[in-house]
Image (tube, grey):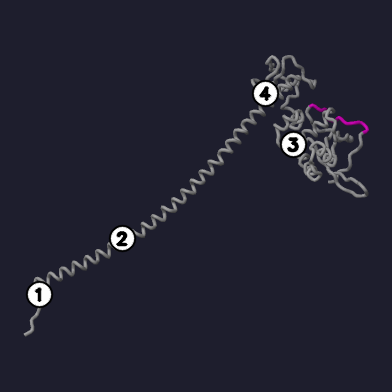
Amino acid sequence: MTTHPDHTDPNASTVRALAAELESLREQIATLESTLERKDDRLERLESDLERTREANDRLEDRVDELEDARRPIEARLDAHEKKLDANKARVGELQARELEKGAHLLDANVDEHAIDVADGRLERISKDDGRRHLRLPESDDPLERGGGVALAHGDLLPIQQLARMDDDMLHATTSALPSRLAAKLWKARTDPGVGDDPWRSGSVDVREYVTASDMKHWIRRQESGISESYAKKLVSRTIDAIRDLSKHRLAIERTRQHKNGLEYTERRVLLRTDAEIPGETPGATTENAPATGGVDG
């Protein structure tokens, strides 16, 4: 006789319950393992992000160190620049004091009277016919003897005239550009007979004076020892540009045809025309029986 399992057997029920619980535990373990794997992946990503952040932080720290190293020379240059500005201000004050002691009348707006050291420390403020206020030493007359009570103040001069008045030390302190210094010396050679080395030539009816590029080249080499001919030629162009700018384009440039050794070539000339308005100089002044300048090469 065959016997059938008793479905009401408590052992069988227990086995089924244990099997179900075991399966549930297996599912929970699989879920936990999957969760743990995801956490491991996230942890690896976070560790990678942290490493990149550390590397970026190291680069930033290196950059901060570089900027800190660069800051110190910049601060040193700023300090040097400030000292240079103070020195230039002192030099300008010294120049103004010298001009005042020579009898100049300077525009009030251009003078810091507290920084001017003149004899007895006395300055007189006066009103001129041009409607502007000027400073002078008491009872000093206009050294240029201009009529109408109008003085030729330092501020009324063209920049080229202001630079030409300076000595070499003050000129170097005022401008570091060699072409500008050469332009000032070239102008001074034209106006100051004491300079001696004057490359300017007398002009014709409509040209008061002129200087050729070739004469300027030789003059520059005499002024600046050790300069090669090729570099002097470059300085000619730069000096011409500087003297035009510093004279506020009161000077003209022309190109003239020249003949030498049977060859024709074009040369530049810097012209001071008779109708040019130069402060302190009389327009229209010409030199009698002066040689005519060459034709203009358009």
- Residue 275 figure quarter: top right
* The N terminus, quarter of image: bottom left
Amino acid of disc 3: Ser
Secondary structure type for disc 2: helix
Which sits earlier in the primary sequence, circle 1 or circle 2?
A: 1
- Residue 268 figure quarter: top right
Numbered range of the magenta stretch: 280-289
Question: Which residue position is annotated with label 1?
Answer: 7
Which sits earlier in the primary sequence, circle 3 or circle 4?
A: 4
- Marks 1 and 3, how far apart in space? 118 Å
Magenta part, dominant SS: loop
**Residue 84 image offset from top left, x and y in percent:** 65, 31
Mark 2 against mark 3, which lies toward the viewer? Answer: 2
Amino acid of disc 2: Leu
Question: Which residue position is annotated with label 4?
Answer: 111
Secondary structure type for disc 1: loop
Q: Residue at x 58, y 38 (%)?
A: 74
Question: Which residue position is annotated with label 3?
Answer: 180
Q: Is residue 288 magenta?
A: yes
Which sits earlier in the primary sequence, circle 1 or circle 4?
A: 1
Which one is nearer the viewer's eye here, 29 or 275?
A: 29
66 displayed left or right of 249: left
Q: Residue at x 68, y 19 (%)?
A: 117
Amino acid of disc 4: Val
Secondary structure type for disc 4: loop
Q: Residues within 10 Å of mark 1 (few under 14, many from 20)?
A: few
Question: Which residue position is annotated with label 2?
Answer: 36
- Marks 1 and 2, how far apart in space? 41 Å
**Residue 236 image offset from top left, x and y in percent:** 79, 41
Q: Are marks 4 and 2 in contact (CB under 8 Å)?
A: no
Secondary structure type for disc 3: helix
